Amino acid sequence: MAVPYSPTLKIKSALLKQQKEQWQKRFLWRSILLTSLVSSLLAITIIPQGKIKHPNQVQIKGTELVTNSTIYRLLNVPYSQFIWQIPTHRLSQNLESIPAIADVKISKKIFPPLLQIFIEERNPVALAVSQSTSDWGFLDAEGILLDPQYYEPNRGKILVSQLKVINFDPSYASLWSEIYSLVKSNPNIRVKEVQWDKSGNLYLKTDLGKVYLGSDSSRLPEQFAAIANLKNLPKYLNPSEIHYIDLTNPDRYSIQKYSQK
């Protein structure tokens, strides 16, 4: 049996729907107002405390060689500023201005207010010495000079090998990188010193004695292979008698002895 059409029922249904929508709107606005009130109260609590005021609010991570005092000095953090106002990009540039640091990442933590500094250092692998000025520093594997002023003399973690590089010039960076790679890949060849003279000629000081490689670096891998093939030389000749081993032509070496008095 069909239900007769009732205009009153339709009106009541529409009124109920309208009341429900109004209630939902009021609930939404109340929620927004409550959230705003809580956020405002939280902001009132946090904002006065949201400043970087002291160095202990700056956390430094990743440093093993560069001293923290160096980091703080180079950062030059503008203290008593709100954490969100501190220019992290400029602080990163300050730190990356020294060769001892390869990369920097800075993050901000608002509550509690902290600056977190993540440092990636360059690894010193050799001691670079100038014979003319007696200046010294460190070299990394890529040929970047690292000034010792950024390290504590007694820090004890700068465990560079006994490898020394004499008369290094920044123009030799790519050549040094190749030499160091060959040194690492030939552990049976004990290289103690890498030296350039004023004419750009290259010498190596090894357990076999001084090895002259010349100024042509195109055959370096062959020259290192030739040094490795001479490992039995001390059985036949005392290294103290050798002035230098000429390996400018790695296919045919020659030995220059000290002149006998």
Image (cartoon, grey):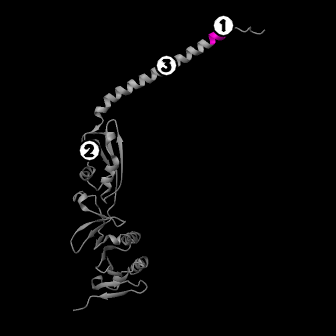
Q: Nearer the viewer, residue 208 or 184?
A: 184
Q: Quadrant of residue 51?
A: top left
The local secondary structure at tag 2 comes to loop
Segment colored magenta? 7-13
Q: Is residue 165 above or below residue 96?
A: below
Residue 27 marker: 3
Q: Is residue 134 above or below residue 243?
A: above
Distance (Cα) linking label 1 and label 2: 73 Å
Mark 1 or mark 2: whose residue is earlier in sequence: 1
Q: Nearer the viewer, mark 3 or mark 1?
A: 1
Please give the residue where the numbered disc 1 appears in the rendered image.
Answer: 8
Amino acid carrying mark 2 in the image: Pro
Of all residues, the one furthest to the bottom in this rendering is 261
Mark 2 or mark 3: whose residue is earlier in sequence: 3
Could you tell me which residue is drawn at 45 percent across and 24 percent down?
32
Q: Position of residue 108 (x, y in %)?
A: 35, 42
Q: Nearer the viewer, residue 100 or 5?
A: 5
Q: Nearer the viewer, residue 202 or 31?
A: 31
Q: Position of residue 180 (x, y in %)?
A: 37, 70
Q: Residue 209 lies in magenta, yes or no?
A: no
Mark 3 or mark 1: whose residue is earlier in sequence: 1
Distance (Cα) linking label 2 and label 3: 45 Å
Q: Is residue 255 above or below residue 132?
A: below
Q: Nearer the viewer, mark 1 or mark 2?
A: 1
Amino acid carrying mark 3 in the image: Phe
In the image, 8: left or right of 171? Answer: right
Residue 137 marker: none
The crowding category of the residue bearing disc 2, from other C-alpha atoms within 10 Å (few below 14, some 14 to 19, many at least 20), is some
Amino acid carrying mark 1 in the image: Thr
Residue 78 marker: 2
The local secondary structure at tag 1 comes to helix
Distance (Cα) linking label 3 and label 1: 29 Å
